[in-house]
Amino acid sequence: MKTLLPVLQPAAAPRRSPDWVRISYASAVALRFKSGRFTRDFDFGGINLLLSYDEGCLSDCGYCGLARTRPGQYEDKSFIRVEWPLVETDELVRRLARCEDRLTRLCISMVTHGNSYRDTLEITKRIRAGVATPLSLLVAPPTLNEVRLRTLKEAGADIIGIGLDAVTEDLFRSIRTNVPQGGLRWEQYWRIVDAARDIYGPWHVNCHTLVGLGESDRDLMAIFERLLDRQIHSYLFCFNPEPDSRMGTSPKSDLSRWRRIQLAKFLLEESGLSAGAFAYDNEGALVSISAPRALVEETVADGFAFMTNGCPGAGGEPGCTRPMGSWRPSEAPRDYPWQPTESDELEIRRQLRLDEILRSGPGPTRPRELWAPPVAGRPARSVRAEHQ
Amino acid sequence: MPENWFEVGGYRLCSDRYYDAERHLWVELQPGSRVARVGFDPLGRETSGDIVEVSLSVVGTHVNRGEPFGNVEAAKFVGPLQAPVSGVVSGRNAQVLSRPGVLNDDPNEAWLVELDMADSSELSQLLRGEEQLRLWFAAEIERYRRQGAVAE
C-alpha cells in the first residue's frame, strides 16, 4: 500500500523588522490598520513604531510589557498595556505618505536586540524616501555608539529619545540591571545621552522619566534639573502596571502626586523657578512650592503643564501626544493629549489641592537663556513678563 | 449562513432581530416571553475598537430606553451602553463580564443583557427586516468609513 506523504508548504518568511514593524494602537487606528475611535475627538498625528523580532527584546526591565521574562510569546505581549499590531513596513510607508498632511511626528522605538541598529537605520531610510514628517528615534543604548548616532542623523532622524525611566542609579540597577536576564547599565545610558546631546544639539535629545517606580519627588526634580542644565528635555511618563510583569501588581502613582510633579516640572523648566523654590519632607516628597500665586494660577489655567510631553511637529506644534498611553479610557487622564478644557481644569485643581503646597515666593530667578523652550505649540505668554 | 442571516459589507445581520440604529445594538425576542436579549451589532463593536472591559447593571435594575445599562471600554474608547428598549435587567451574560474579548470574536453571539420589556410597542422604534436593514447598515458603514473608524 502506498502512503502519500503530505505536501510540504514552503515556510512563511518570518514577520520581523525591518520588513515588518509594530505600530501603536492609536497610530494603527489613525492609519486605518485597525478599526476604532477615541472617546474624544482631537487632532492626532504622532505615529509610534516599534521594532519586532520573534526573540523579542533582550532586556528584562521589571515594569515593561516587553520584558524578556514576562510570560507569553513576544507577538502576544502588550506594550504600555495595549496591543501593538504588526504591519508591513512598505505598506506603512505608503499609508504615511497618503496621510502626510495630517501627520505631525513619527517615532521608531528600538528594542534591545542585535539587529536593532541595522533595522532602525533601514526603516529610517525607507520612511525618509517616502515621507517628510519629522522623525524621532527612541533608542536602545546598548546597541549604539557615536558613529551609529551620527549615521542615524544623516539618514534623517532629528531627535533622539532615551528611555531612562528609572531616575536614580540605585533604582535603575534594581529594576533594569540586577534582573533575571539582560541587565542594562546606567553608565552606558548616560554615555549615549551625552553623545546624542553632542551630535543632535540642544533640545534635540530627550530622556523619558517615569513616575511611580519607587523614586521620590526630590529624585525626579533633581533629574529634571540635571537634564535642563544640559539643554535636554525630560519627558514625563506615568508608571502604568503591565499585567504579569514583575511590577504588575505595583500600584500606579497617586494622582495628586502625579499632578504636582507635572506642575513643579513645568515651573522649573519653563517658568524659570529655581530648584530652591521646591521643598521636600524627609522622605523626599514635595511639600511646598514657593512662587507668586498669579504665576501658578496662570500655569494651571492654561493647562500646558498637564499635557503630554512629546516631540514637536515640523511647525513646532505638539507632535507626539500618545493618547491614553499611561491611562485607561475609563480612568482620569494623566497627561492630556489635548489642551485641557475648563472641565479638565476643574479636575486638575481638585487633584492638585494647590492651597496645601503653594507658598508665597519670588518669581523666576533662573536666567532666561537657561529656561527650556516652550513645549510644542504653545504661544509665548506676555503675562510672564509681569513675574520677572 | 443560517436562515435569516445575511451580509452587508462583510458584516452579518439577522432579519429576525431588531436593531437600534442610533446605538448599534441588536434586540432578539426570546420565544414565548417579554424578554429581549441585547447585544452589540458588528459595526458598533468594530468601531469601538478592541473591547477590554464591560460592566453591566445588576439584575433587577430598571432602565428606560436610552438610559445606560452598562459601560464598555475599548483600547482607546469608553462609553455607556444605552438601553434600546425599556425594561428590567433579568439576565447578564457572565461570559462577557469575565472575558470581554468574546465580544471582539463574535458580537452577534455574545449577548450583553436580557431585559424584561416594560412596553413592547417601543420595538416599533427599532429597525427590522432585511430590506430596511441593508439600506441602513450600508449607509452606516459608509459614514464610519468617512470618519476613519473602520480599517482598510
Image (cartoon, coloured by chain):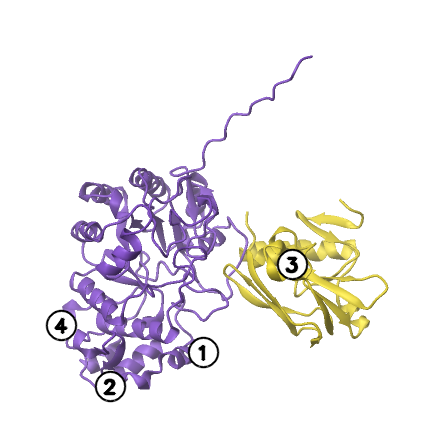
Chain colours: A purple, B yellow
| Amino acid type assigned to the residue bearing label 1 in the image | Ser
| Amino acid type assigned to the residue bearing label 4 in the image | Pro
Quadrant of residue A366 in the image? bottom left
Residue B141 drawn at (x, y percent): 63, 54
Tell me which residue sits at (18%, 74%) in the image: A275
Label 1–label 4 contact, CB within 8 A:
no
- In terms of depth relative to the viewer, which is nearer, A191 or B139? A191
Q: Chain of mark 1?
A: A
| Amino acid type assigned to the residue bearing label 3 in the image | Gln
CA gap, disc 2 and disc 3: 53 Å
Q: Chain of mark 2?
A: A
Q: Secondary structure at mark 4?
A: loop
- Residue corresponding to mark 1: A343
Q: Chain of mark 4?
A: A
| Amino acid type assigned to the residue bearing label 2 in the image | Arg
In the image, residue A215 sits, relative to residue A89, either above or below, namely below
Respond whether the residues carrying marks 1 and 4 are from the same subunit: yes
Residue density around tag 1, few if under 14, some if 14–19, many if 20 or more, within 10 Å = few
Q: Secondary structure at mark 1?
A: helix
Respond whether the residues carrying marks 4 and 3 are from the same subunit: no
CA gap, disc 1 and disc 3: 36 Å
| Count of numbered badges drawn on the protein | 4
Q: Quadrant of the N terminus of chain B?
A: top right
Label 2–label 3 contact, CB within 8 A:
no
- Residue corresponding to mark 3: B95
